[in-house]
Image (cartoon, rainbow, N blue to C red):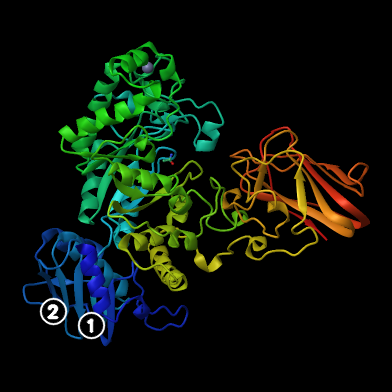
Amino acid sequence: MKYFIRILIVAFFVVGVCYLVCEMGSGKNQVSIIPAPVEYSAGSGTFSVCGEKCKLDNGQLRDYITMNTPLDWSFSEDGSVRFICDSAIVAEGYRISVTKDSIIVGYSDYSGAFYAVQTILQMMDVSGRVPVCEIYDFPKYEWRGAMLDLSRHFFGYDFVLKQIDAMAALKLNKLHLHLTDAAGWRIEIEKYPRLTSFAAWRTGSTWKEWWFGDRKYLEEGTPGAYGGYLTKEQAREIVRYAAQRGIEVIPEIEMPAHSEETLTAYPEYSCTGEMYVHPDFCIGKEGTFKFLEGILTEVMEVFPSEYIHIGGDEAGKQAWKSCPDCLERVRKEKLENSDALQPYMIKRIADFLQSNGRKVVGWDEILVGGAPEQAAIMIWRGLENVDEAISQGNDIILTPGAYCYFDTYQDAPDRLPEAMGGYLPLSKVYSYEIPDSEKIMGVQGNLWAEYVSTPEHAEMMIYPRLFAIAELGWGTDNKGNYEQFRCRAMVHGERMSEKGYNVFDLSEEYGQRKEFLAPIEHLAIGKKVIYNAPYYPGYTAGGDSALVDGIRGGWTYQDERWQGFIRRDRLDVLIDMGEVTDLSEIYADFMQICGPEVYHPAQVIISVSDDNESFTELLNDSYEVVRDSGITFKRVSWSGSCKARYIRYQARAGQFGGFVFTDEIVVK
Ligand code: ACM
Ligand code: ZN
């Protein structure tokens, strides 16, 4: 119904984002609102907020405005800024009518009134002038979220409050806190104190140092221990602070996997009872359920959210195969095999939460074996999981890694601090086409923090990409509007920078790898390639013609333009030029990103032949492969003068093994 009303409204009004003038650097009055309102029609002149009167019924909203808006809005019964409750306005929606003499806001719930204030604040200039206009606005999706990974790096209480303010300005309404993972437990649980006195502290201050080091936990107070956690009091304050800004906080407690820290603090809930061994809970032991229910009971006391996130991703399920307790559970519950313990556990926990008036949300792995009926599925992998969730009848929150994971590079990797990998510029986040289904609750941007160790870095990874999530979640038409959106994103980025956020500066954006942008012409295009060693099935770049199609790769091997080799000596291909050809240059580029074990080659041999039997080496060079951070590229080329029909290009792995990736063998 809401969707139908939206279509009607859009059809009847000639308004919209085209009025959202954005003239960077011109010094002209700018109206730049993110997310763009459904309807905006501009008038002429301005209303001045300063010193005027404002009637506001809702005490909470009045407190918010008093505390958080930069100007001195005064409040009285008969002022020229009025908030009028209008039950015809949809949930979270609002109307704003600005004339030279008044601002009148219509709303039907707290969030709507709050969002009207956010829009007014984004329109208002430093002197408190608001342009004359009419706005009607409401979101398309009920879930407009951001996720902060507080486990891999604990950015602290103040950081969370600061991000809530930023989310509020963007009209985002769900804050998902990833509170537990191998790297540290981050929420006080009184019944199980070792979760915070031990599992919240570790040896390395950066995740990389710890993960590639000893991966030990430490007693709280140990000199040099890195970590921390939210006390219940802090968590309650986060919930209150967020609610005042129209945001619900959804805690995530991981199970059955990603639980190394928990199972080292409480090894009795693992299959063998050993510390430092298990990522997965033992599902055979009844005590595991008592333990998790005890934790969730305290979590529910602190977080009143409709949904509790219970993880569910990436379970290895190894120990279950030989654990007597797990096998007994399989037998007793007549499960197909030990893998089926995962859906068994998720269903049992979902029932527990439901009996306490809550619903579960879990990562899309909870679809395997059948998700609980009431569960919302957070899609982070492929689109096929959207289809699967729809076919199972579950609600869906979209967080696909390819568009919504902010641990990726947003610009040329050599201009940014080391990231997890991947390339996700603002334009790509914005380009995400949300599937059309009533089951879609909304969309969320996730900051995983393995490679993000400071609050400043975290903010740079989140903003401006979260602006695009806000706009997708609001339902703004994102087709063909990117340049206009980018312009508004720059304005909003400046506003945030002035408030002390570390926002990635779009004006400095370099963009995609230049080789990616246009095909290259060369002599081997379309020639036959014979693979002496196969490419890896997951990284085909389109198959046998990929290395001679003129199409170059970008900043990530996930862009389906880089071909990957892991078998035998790695890259070993023969190009048949069809006839003896004059050659002056042969080269290939290689990518290195050490985290996922992609390395430059240690040896490259380029050789040529007329008969495919007797080969002459043009180049045979060895290189030291050095582990570094970030993404780097190495070009290995021969230049000179010769004639040949066959070209063999070999690139061998070095001491670290791993993948060799190249995008094209260029022949001139
Ligand atoms: C995930 O990225 N493992 C949900
Ligand atoms: Zn077990």
- Which of 363/469 is in front? 363
Q: Report the amino acid beneath label 1.
A: Phe
Mark sitting earlier along the chain (1/2): 1
Look at the numbered disc 1 and give the secondary structure of its residue. Answer: strand
- Which of 368/42 is in front? 368
Q: Residue at x 44, y 22 (%)?
A: 278
* Residue 275 seen in render: no
Can you name the residue that lies furthest to the left here? 77
Whether ligand 1 has any atom under 8 Å from the Cβ at mark 2 is answered as no
Circle 1: is it few (<14), some (14-19), or many (20+) Cα within 10 Å? many
- Tell whether label 2 touches label 1 (CB within 8 Å): yes
Residue 406, position in %: x, y? 46, 51
Residue 236, position in %: x, y? 22, 42
Residue 252, position in %: x, y? 32, 38
Q: Quadrant for residue 157, please give it.
A: top left
Left or right of 441 on screen, residue 597: right
Q: Quadrant of the N terminus?
A: bottom left
Q: Residue at x 67, y 41 (%)?
A: 535
Q: Quadrant of the C terminus?
A: bottom right
Q: Residue tagged by mark 2?
A: 80
User: On residue 21, which mark appears?
Assistant: none
Q: Quadrant for residue 612, please give it.
A: top right
Ligand 2 placement by image quarter: top left
* Residue 585 seen in render: yes
Left or right of 651 on screen, residue 463: left
Left or right of 270 on screen, residue 118: left
Residue 125, position in %: x, y? 32, 77
* Tally of numbered discs: 2
- Which of 110/456 is in front? 110
Q: Residue tagged by mark 1?
A: 47
Q: Report the amino acid beneath label 2.
A: Ser
In the image, residue 266 sits, relative to residue 419, either above or below, namely above
